[in-house]
Image (cartoon, rainbow, N blue to C red):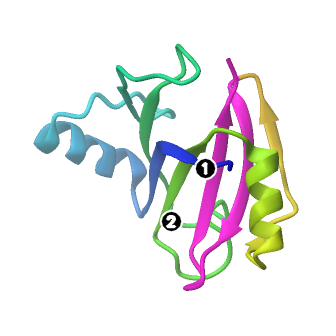
Amino acid sequence: MARVTGIGGIFLKAKDPKALGAWYAEHLGFTVKPGEGACFFWKDEVPEGTGMTTWSTFAETTKYFGPGPQRAMVNYRVDDLDALLEQLAAAGVEIDPKRDDYDFGRFAWIVDPEGNRIELWQPLA
């Protein structure tokens, strides 16, 4: 069974992404890189060399979180994106037809029963 293996990222909308990132850096010790956010590396990596959780801010006007008032989105790492999407489709879960492929992984989006957009990421080795 395909499954989630961890949290790949936490993304927040912000009126002023730079200022919010600076606040997290000052008060919570995040090392924030402009345009990238902060990365927290894991010791338990699957596949090896890909384990990290990203934290990042987005402009309040971003459409990346989908339509509606959603203020945050979680990115879940998955072990087999295609198999998981098949399982979710069979269960009647709402799936965005859009897919993104990059040299660091493959992405898809689903919607939970409360209308929250969720990002799924399968890292590449």
Q: Secondary structure at mark 1?
A: loop
Spot occupied by residue 125 in the image (x, y as percentages of width and height): 67, 17
Residue pointed to by mark 1: 3
Q: Earlier in the sequence, mark 1 or mark 2?
A: 1
Residue type indicated by callout 1? Arg
Mark 2 crowd level (few <14, some 14–19, many ≥20, 10 Å Cα): some
| Residue in view at x 34 percent, y 31 percent | 32
Spot occupied by residue 103 in the image (x, y as percentages of width and height): 75, 22
| Residue in view at x 62 percent, y 55 percent | 119
Q: Nearer the viewer, residue 112 or 27?
A: 112
Q: Secondary structure at mark 2?
A: loop
Mark 1 crowd level (few <14, some 14–19, many ≥20, 10 Å Cα): some
Q: Nearer the viewer, residue 121 or 86?
A: 86
Mark 1 vs mark 2: give the one in front. 1
The residue furthest right is 97
Q: Is residue 18 left or right of residue 23?
A: right
Start-end of magenta stretch: 104-125
Q: CA distance from mark 1 to mark 2?
A: 31 Å
The residue furthest front is 1
Total number of numbered labels?
A: 2
Q: Is residue 36 left or right of residue 3?
A: left
Spot occupied by residue 47 in the image (x, y as percentages of width and height): 59, 21
Residue type indicated by callout 2? Glu
The prevailing secondary structure element of the residues shown in magenta is strand
Q: Nearer the viewer, residue 76 or 58?
A: 76
Check the image and report above or below for 91 versus 78.
below
